[in-house]
Image (tube, helix red, strand yellow):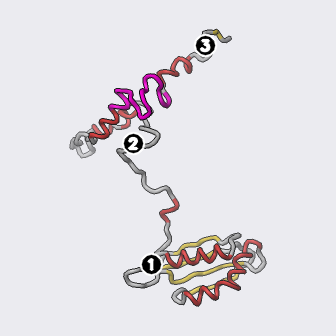
Amino acid sequence: MNAATGTWHLKRAIIRYSETGGSSLGARFYLQHLLPVWKERNPQVIVVTEHARLDHPELQCEWASGEKFEISLRRLKPRQIEDLMNLMRNSESPNLYLRHGGPRVWTERRSVQGLWQPSPEGMFRALKFGRQSSWMGEKHKELKYSSQTLKLCQQHLLERRGRWGDQTEYPKGFDRHVLENVLNQPYRSVGGLDVE
């Protein structure tokens, strides 16, 4: 419902169910016992029930904006169907944005795990496009970083002073320089012993 105007957005709800299907058991109970009470409390919504032979039950809602959305009621309990009907009644439209993770977020704040940094070379190679001229021939402005970002990068990369202490003694994460010889010659020597 729109709190400013007091109008309801859900206009129509169609419930399809099967008289004999096992997945429609909760839907049939809801239609017989709970739906009449819900209709009395919500006269602004047109509720239509349709028999769909041997199909799974589903709820199709239509809002004032013209948007439609179908939800499966397969093996739901009557109380869950009641909650779903109330959710659709209170919604302005189907919330399709919950289906994916949303936009990627970039932040300058340090996370609990510390800064993620595979290698400085890869990072600079990935940012190379920022220094190139654009397609129109105009030169890009130089990339600008905040003072906090520069301070954290200097602390992490140059000073090797991470969140949990000195990283020269105990490097955190994957250090390719430490494992380079092990990966290039895995059977050469292990702990001073030659492995054959």
Three-letter code, disc 1: Ser
Asked if residue 173 is among those painted magenta in the image, a careful observer would answer: yes
**Label 2: which residue?**
110
Verify CB contact (< 8 Å) between mark 1 and mark 3. no
Q: Nearer the viewer, residue 59 or 167?
A: 167
The kind of residue tagged 2 is Arg
Q: Earlier in the sequence, mark 1 or mark 3?
A: 1
| Helix, strand or loop at mark 1 | loop
Looking at the image, tell me whether mark 1 or mark 2 is earlier in sequence order. 1
- Tell me the quarter of the picture where residue 71 sits: bottom right
Give residue 191's mark: 3
How many tags in the picture? 3
Numbered circle sitting on residue 65: 1
Q: Position of residue 94 (x, y in %)?
A: 50, 71
Magenta-tinted stretch: 154-174
User: Which of pointers 2 and 3 lies earlier in the amino acid sequence?
Assistant: 2
Q: Are marks 1 and 2 in contact (CB under 8 Å)?
A: no
* Residue type at tag 3: Gly
